[in-house]
Image (cartoon, grey):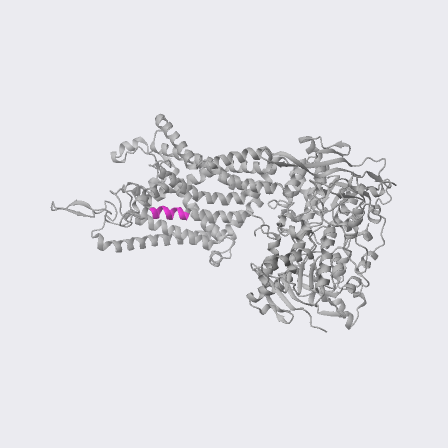
Amino acid sequence: MKSPLLQVENLTVRIDSGKTQVRAVDGVSFSINRHETFALLGESGCGKSMTALSLMRLLPDAGRIVSGAVSLDGQDLLALPEIAMRSVRGERIAMIFQEPMNSLNPVMTVGRQIAETLLRHTGLRGEAVQARVLELLDDVGIPDAKARCNDYPFQFSGGMKQRVMIAIALACEPDLLIADEPTTALDVTIQAQVLDLLRRLQRERGMAVLLISHDLGVVAGMAQRVAVMYAGEIVETADRGDFFAHPKHPYTRKLFASLPGAARRGQQLEIIRGMVPRLDQEFSGCRFAGRCDSAWERCHTTIPEWVEVSSGHGVRCHLFAALRVSTPSSALPLQGGGCETGAALSTPSPLQGEGWDGGEGVAPLLQVDGLKVHFPIHKGLFKRVAGQVMAVDGVSLAIHSGRTLALVGESGCGKTTVGKGILQLLRPTAGSVRFAGEELTRLQGAALRARRANFQIVFQDPYSSLDPRMRVADIIEEGMMALGAAAAASERQSQVDCLLRQVGLSPDSKYRYPHEFSGGQRQRVAIARALGVRPKLIICDEPTSALDVSVQAQILNLLKGLQDELGLAYLFITHNLAVVEYFAHEVAVMYLGRIVERGTVEEVMRAPRHPYTQALLSAVPAADAGSSREIIRLAGDLPSPANPPSGCHFHPRCPQAMPACRESYPAEVVFSATHSVHCLLFAGK
Amino acid sequence: MLLFLLLAGVAFYAWRVRRREHLLQPWRRLMRSRSGMASAVVLLAFVAVGVLDSLHFRLPLERQANNAETHYSPEVLSVFDLLAGPLRKQLEKTYSAPFAVHLFTKETIELPGGKQTRDFPRLKYGGAHLRDPVADRAADIAVTAATGALYALVLCAVMTALLVLWLARRRGVSPGAAWMLIRHGHDEIPWRTLLATIGLLILFVCLAALLSAKYHLLGTDKVGQDVFYLALKSIRTGLMIGTLTTLVMLPFALLLGIMAGYFRGWVDDVIQYTYTTLSSIPGVLLIAAAVLILQVYMDSNQEMFDTVAARADIRLLFLCIILGVTSWTGLCRLLRGEALKLREMEFIQAATAFGVGHFRIIARHILPNVMHIVLISIVLDFSGLVLAEAVLSYVGVGVDPSMQSWGNMINGARLEMAREPMVWWSLLAAFVFMFVLVLSANLFSDRVRDAFDPRVR
């Protein structure tokens, strides 16, 4: 067998943070063969990116490699002088970062940024450089490369920027490409494009790829071998097929089980209790022991050894060490695949309100008709209105109390604007928003303020939605005080305690500041704040997309529990279709400011009619290795809402577009009482 | 008096904070920082001098009648003037170097024999007690300094003992244990640093008190006034200009800056045009015009200003107002930018969703989040303002020429820099005092910012 391309042995990285040392990476060993895609999988803060950065020797100043060896093709990278390392970077190992927006220099044309790498690492000069740049841009699928190589990064969309980043990384034909969450910042349809590109390039050039991701779906589609990191250690390594069919480590199993999806509707999601332990302590046992359901006393006292379960499949867990010596039957509760385990835990109970009549006869809690939010574009000295950004252009929807409507779409399609338009945070340009029969768009000042207790919002980013200078108690109290929910101070305090308990936080935490909490806990605080005024409707604007999978499961469980308990209605704005399948009752799919398809979850997710919905569903990477669905590739990006295409907004990207699609916007076609779609394909029927 | 209103305000705030635990917390954190406490002590010393100097009064007439006529003075005295009595009165003829016993310039002296000679005459006060100035001076200075140091040592010891006893009672331990706490720096509050700073301060005060009684510690200026005394008197001017200007400027900058950023639209336009216009006019011109107007007004209404000090004070106050009105634009622009950023933050939107009113949002959410910018730019402006005062004095529109200020001192020393040998002491004195004040203000505000940011622990 050939020696591997990259061999990492016992890599240990410490980060100095004042008095303590954080063990960011602790004894990580793996190897990557040529032509292979190796995935590092793990939640945020587990040391994935630190591992990658230390391979490139690009650690932040406080970080330092304590021990270990990294050899590329037999050459010890850690022993190289910095000057030699510079020629390794870019030439033999290249890296793509998560944020395409931040990793390109905004004041250089993309052509020059690619040429920069070429000039540094190759002997190409003059015309030859230009030719190579064009070739690279062509390779990564940027149309009209000749014209576009003189464009600046802001003239490219997110997906295109990531392609440019890939072009830069590939400029010198590296042996190893490190892709650090390459698609996390992108939409699903764009993600599918970029992953396709990576896969094609790898096949053509025979590079090895180190893929770093938290997304099981992406890993399933890309990797040949998978390593799971937890708290600075690799806890499991396996081939892809083996990994997705028979995950061994309890942490990996939990990860699978906490994925939301249609199969788990109506059940609680599996959650991993507690949090990732602090990495500045000395561990005396298994790092996962505190959160593991099958931990026994040995897990807390002895550090588990690396166990080869089968060839190429290793686990760091006492369960499997014990398996080989003597098999304690009680310690083997987990057999079979992770996905199946989760689904088989309990038989799906009928969803509350599953046999629901569709709400006829009952007036909906929220009724939105023809909502339009346009932003004027000002030009010139006197700020004349030169055009309109039609962020939301005629959206109608209805939510009944106790139900969840999911609003799905790619970023930039106007989902969030719909939410803010309903809340009157942005005043709609036209249309009506009726809450419990009352028109909100015409209300002003105090009258509107009085209604605000009824509908609340939970934002996407729990880091910016809580004022960093206020204590949790003040944050929760603020809404109550503004809306006069509880008059006396002592009464308010006891309510705050009660709310914190309701969202699963201890009442003592009310004297702390938001920065002392983790992302999931902050989101709980944000939910408690919304609940403080006893709303009937909560607009959840991507409440889990900034969170890790296991934390996402906790928040989804919490939201579901609150709905059952308090009969809340949710408008759930998201781009994550798995969450929709798990959580929502009804779905509305938005494209460029308009709803293109709506219906119940079963109707839309099982039998999507609109070509956009179909493409969206097929682009979601599935977290199992066996699936071989046909993915509908969408060409291009979302058009600008300032200048939408004529006719059906989707026709330039639609694989089934007809000439008639260009003419006029299709009318609504109704399939059932709940299911309707805007598409000419069905207009005749 | 504005200053006392300010002090009362600070006292009220302190009383309010003491009653609320979570408001007390940041101050506790501040007390734990060494550089914060050290600079606070120095700042307090400056403020104490300034406050003493602001306690104006006029000696009662009957006492004046009892006393000799030489004590009669039309000017208002301050408590500080009483304390530094001899310094104020010991006027020489003209320049003399620090610790000098002779004047800086040669004069014709009449010798006892009736002969005349040109030599450096003896000073009237500086080292007047010495019989043989050249030989005895060094020894005398050393002895006086040693006495001063001894006093300082005794005072420090007394203070430490008091602190130990107080701490022992407060923490409920024996005095010995309290002493160990202090010595090893185990207590929360850095007593060691605190004691060292106060000790240094006491040492300085003792030395200065003893030495300046016999010598001109920092020399004398052109009209023979003691430079050390002038520098001390200038503290009040510096503090007044710094704080009053800031007080005048802050409401403009805070309110307008945040309003522009928060409300956007036409409010933003109006405020932006205002400050762009204002900052495009050279500030010195505006100030000169305003001060000249005041001058004319004062000249035509002389009966309203009965004393020289009152005139000087009014002029100072007016200068502060004018400086404040012209200098808010920079901070305002910064705050507008920050408010523009903050208003898009989701916590502001969440507050809007709760129906919290605009002014409440500004007060509770935006203001605390821009406070760090305000603190930093105020302290940076503070030194700039003291310097601006110097520049304006040079143009002739600064504080009243009869008022002691660092600006006037620097201005006076400016011409003498070209002299050979150089007259360096006025400039150096002004520089050192300004430097210490601005540095300690900087350090202190830095700590305050850290202590009030809940994210920094």
Taking the view exactly as shown, the residue that stands out farthest to the right is: A685
* Nearer the observer, B188 or B371: B371
Along the horizontal axis of the image, is A308 left or right of A171?
right
Along the horizontal axis of the image, is B137 left or right of A310?
left
Residue B3, position as x, y percentages in the image? 44, 37
Residue A287, position as x, y percentages in the image? 69, 63
Residue A318, position as x, y percentages in the image? 74, 67
Along the horizontal axis of the image, is A598 left or right of B56?
right
- Is residue A383 something one can see in this rendering? yes
Along the horizontal axis of the image, is B341 left or right of B388?
right
- Quadrant in the picture for residue B386: top left
Dominant SS in magenta: helix
* Quadrant, the N terminus of chain B: top left
* Nearer the observer, A586 or B456: A586
* Nearer the observer, B94 or A202: A202
Task: Check if residue B346 falls in the magenta segment.
Answer: no
- Quadrant in the picture for residue A481: top right
- For the record, the magenta segment spans B427-436
Residue B451, position as x, y percentages in the image? 54, 49
* Nearer the observer, B146 or A412: A412
